[in-house]
Each structure stands twice: as C-alpha cells, then as structure tokens.
Image: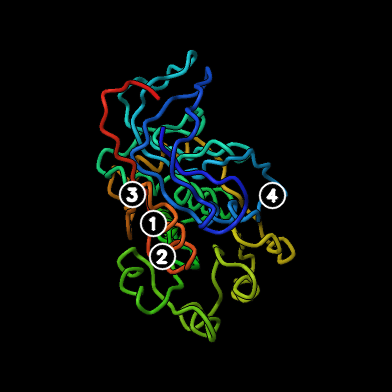
C-alpha cells in the first residue's frame, strides 16, 4: 500500500511517500481504509525525536494518530464494528511505528468510535485527538461547571477551538486568547477573544477582575506562568504543553484513547454542538507540506491529509 514514512528523526525532509508495509489485523483490531488523517503538533514532535524518552520508534515509522475512514475487515474477536462502518479514531499505540498516514491502518477497537454522520471525512479526521484532549482536560482535569469562567489559550487552534465549544456547551463563560486576525472566528465559536502576547494579563483582568476559575494552557513557558497569576482563589490550572504546570499546583495532561469519550464527541458533533474547521487539506503525497504548515503554529482549526484510493479491493 502507499503511505508516508520516515526512517530517522528529522524535519519534514525525512518524510517519504511510497510503498509501506501492509498492516496485520490482530484479533481486537479493525482494518480501516483511511479516507483522511489529521496533522497534529505531536506528530512533528515525534518525528523530530522530542518524545524519544517516552515512545520507542520502530523504523520506518508511519506517522499519524488521527483517522477517519471505513471498516474493511474486523478482527476475529471484534463485535463492535462491521465491514462498511464509517469510523473515527485516535489510533495511538505506546510506540511509534504503525500510524494513519497510509491507505490502510489496523486500529485497536479501544481507539475507535462511529464517525459523525454530519461531518465530512476531512472534518471528522480532525476531531479525535484534539477533541479528546479538550474533553478530557475540561471534564476530567478541570471539572468545569456551569457559570464558571474559563481561559482557553490558542483558542483558534485545533485543540483550543474545540475546547471553546465544549466549555461553552458545559455552561461556562470562555475567554480565548488568539491573534487579532482570529478574533471573529473565536467569537463565532462562543468565546470572548483577547490578544495574546505582552499585556495579556491586564487584558484578561479587564474581563475577569476577580480572576478566572480555570485555565486550559496549550502553550506553556511564560504563558503558563502568566496564567497561574490569573486564577481566582481555588482556581484550577491544566496544561497539555508544559509539565512544569505541576509546580504551579496544576495538572499535566496527555490525551488517552477512550472509545466512550470519543463516542460522546461524535454525538456532540451530530447534535451541532461541535464543528471542526479545516484550514487546508493536502493529498497524501504532499504530507510533508501539511507538516510544514502545521509547524508554523498559526493554524486556524485543523490541517488534514486526504487519502483517496478508488479500487475494488476488500483489503490491504
């Protein structure tokens, strides 16, 4: 099958398009014909070796953890899905090797849910990792309640935009940091936009003089330190970008595959609560360009890679 792979750590130049190994389908896995796969910052961080301390690479690595597609064949013990089912998944294993940037992927059932019927495959591919991250931080780590004020950083990005929508659905008032060019977009998602950068603390305090009840940090570093000073008494802080959040009394979060949570996100999408903005879609052979654009860090919503293989085959 065709796919993207890399045989060593490095920049986008190490990504190669060509023949990759066909996936084997284990008893609790599902063979999925990939229609689209989303690009996430963690993908290029893995490719450049930043996660080497926690994830062993098995080269050549097929990158990608997000997927939307169609079930070709369920594994021997799988009863949850049948051939022809449209699914989404956060297909992360505990090592780097068998990702979603290929024509097919063998996905464990613990990573999958049914695709929202009202989303395109491109939109649906952008939901799993970013949506699960937002949901698990807001509901699990921060325990957001109705009437609270939540500060969401990078509110126009993939995780941030979904966090705004989920927090709003939970009944929270949301303040979202974004560049001025994205203020209208963030406002449309349901948040009160504020410009990030120098003077951020003063701008947030103008809107929340008594502090915010919770902060969802997606940036880390100086932004994390600033955020800690914006909390109201008993306020909560969580970060997906900087483990130093623990020294500020907060929680560090790394998203986990969870079919129940993913199913809830799919339901919210079908109810019209969640939407996924796709900034740009690239064909599989141009995955390196998709990575370069994502790595610039100015993405509004999601960047996806599409896989369009029209054949009569029933498997890889």
Q: Which residue is mark 3?
A: 283
Q: Are marks 4 and 1 in contact (CB under 8 Å)?
A: no
Residue positioned most to the top: 76
Residue 288 percent across, percent down from the top left:
44, 55
Q: Residues within 10 Å of mark 1 (few under 14, many from 20)?
A: many
Q: Which of 117 and 72 lies nearest the eye of the viewer? A: 72
Of labels 2 and 3, the one closer to you: 3
Q: Quick one: quadrant of the N terminus?
A: top left
Q: Which residue is mark 1?
A: 302
Residues at marks 4 and 3, CA–CA distance in whole angstroms: 28 Å
Residue 227 percent across, percent down from the top left:
60, 72
Residues at marks 2 and 4, CA–CA distance in whole angstroms: 25 Å
Q: Which residue is mark 4?
A: 52
Q: Which residue is mark 2?
A: 299
Residues at marks 1 and 2, CA–CA distance in whole angstroms: 7 Å
Residues at marks 4 and 1, CA–CA distance in whole angstroms: 25 Å
Q: Which of 264 and 232 lies nearest the eye of the viewer? A: 264
Of labels 4 and 1, the one closer to you: 4
Of labels 4 and 3, the one closer to you: 3
Marked residue nearer the N-terminal end (2 or 4): 4
């Amino acid at each position: 099958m065709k796919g993207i792979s890399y045989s060593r750590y490095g920049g986008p130049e190490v990504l190669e398009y060509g023949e990759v190994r066909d996936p084997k389908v284990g008893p609790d896995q599902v063979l999925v014909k990939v229609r689209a796969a989303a690009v996430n910052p963690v993908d290029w961080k893995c490719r450049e070796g930043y996660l080497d301390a926690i994830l062993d690479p098995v080269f050549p690595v097929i990158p990608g953890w997000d997927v939307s597609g169609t079930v070709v064949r369920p594994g021997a013990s799988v009863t949850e899905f049948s051939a022809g089912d449209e699914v989404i998944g956060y297909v992360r294993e505990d090592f780097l090797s068998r990702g979603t940037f290929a024509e097919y992927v063998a996905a464990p059932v613990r990573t999958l849910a049914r695709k929202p019927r009202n989303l395109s495959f491109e939109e649906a591919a952008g939901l799993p990792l970013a949506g699960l991250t937002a949901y698990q931080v807001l509901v699990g780590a921060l325990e957001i309640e109705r009437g609270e004020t939540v500060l969401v950083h990078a509110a126009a990005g993939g995780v941030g935009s979904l966090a705004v929508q989920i927090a709003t659905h939970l009944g929270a008032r949301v303040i979202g940091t974004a560049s001025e060019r994205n203020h209208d977009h963030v406002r449309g998602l349901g948040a009160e936009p504020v410009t990030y950068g120098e003077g951020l603390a003063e701008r947030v305090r103008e809107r929340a003089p008594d502090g915010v009840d919770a902060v969802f940090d997606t940036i880390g570093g100086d932004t994390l330190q600033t955020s800690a000073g914006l909390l109201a008494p008993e306020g909560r802080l969580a970060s997906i970008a900087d483990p130093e959040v623990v020294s500020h009394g907060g929680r560090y979060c790394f998203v986990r595959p969870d079919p129940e949570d993913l199913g809830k996100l799919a339901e919210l999408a079908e109810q019209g609560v969640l939407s996924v903005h796709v900034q740009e879609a690239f064909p599989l052979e141009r995955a390196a360009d998709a990575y370069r654009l994502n790595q610039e860090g100015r993405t509004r919503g999601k960047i996806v890679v599409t896989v369009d293989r029209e054949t009569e085959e029933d498997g890889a």
